[in-house]
Image: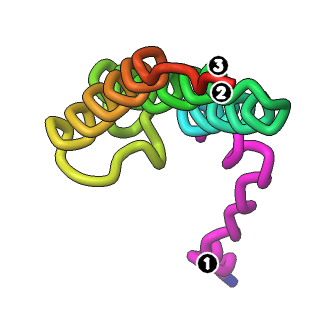
């Protein structure tokens, strides 16, 4: 008798852990951390500092999108690279400049 040929069925591949998927999104999480920190500072009655932090998070997203390849940029990849970079850097810079230039209310 001849032995039976080896089974050609493939072994199921284990799905990556949720933590690994989350770790792969570090650029987005870093930018969101800046934004959330800015919101917390704004809620603590320091709107100017909070707005600068939020603008810095948006600018950081643009810079990361500029330098990271698409496979590492994760969910920062929304449109074409030039558009993502333009929106991130110009939007972040505008937000920071406006937060600094708005005159304080006189009491």
Q: Position of residue 99 (x, y in %)?
A: 48, 24
- The mark that comes first in sequence, 2 or 1, is 1
Q: Residue at x 57, y 76 (%)?
A: 8
Where is mark 3, residue-wise?
Answer: 49
Magenta stretch bounds: 2-25
Numbered label attached to residue 51: none
Numbered label attached to residue 9: 1
- The mark that comes first in sequence, 1 or 3, is 1
Q: Secondary structure at mark 2?
A: helix
The Cα–Cα distance between marks 2 and 1, rounded to whole angstroms, is: 56 Å
Q: Nearer the viewer, mark 2 or mark 1?
A: 2
Q: Position of residue 15 (x, y in %)?
A: 72, 61
Q: Nearer the viewer, mark 1 or mark 3?
A: 3
Q: Residue at x 41, y 30 (%)?
A: 95
Q: Secondary structure at mark 1?
A: loop
Pointer 2 with pointer 1, Cβ within 8 A: no
Looking at this view, is 33 or 96 the one in front?
A: 96
Looking at this view, is 41 or 37 the one in front?
A: 41
Where is mark 2, residue-wise?
Answer: 50
Per the image, is 72 magenta? no
Quadrant of the rendered image containing residue 64 = top left
Per the image, is 10 magenta? yes
Please tell me whether the stretch drawn in magenta is mainly helix, strand or loop: loop
Q: Position of residue 27 (x, y in %)?
A: 54, 31
The Cα–Cα distance between marks 2 and 3, rounded to whole angstroms, is: 4 Å
Q: Residue at x 66, y 30 (%)?
A: 47
């Amino acid at each position: 008798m001849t032995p039976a040929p080896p089974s050609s069925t493939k072994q199921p591949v284990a799905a990556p852990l949720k933590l690994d998927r989350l770790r792969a999104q570090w650029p987005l999480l870093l930018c969101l951390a800046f934004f959330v920190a800015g919101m917390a500072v704004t809620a603590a009655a320091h709107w100017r500092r909070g707005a600068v932090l939020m603008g810095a998070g948006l600018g950081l997203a643009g810079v990361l999108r500029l330098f990271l390849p698409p496979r590492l940029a994760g969910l920062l990849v929304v449109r074409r690279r030039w558009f993502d970079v333009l929106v991130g850097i110009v939007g972040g810079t505008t937000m920071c400049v406006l937060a600094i230039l708005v005159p304080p209310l006189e009491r």
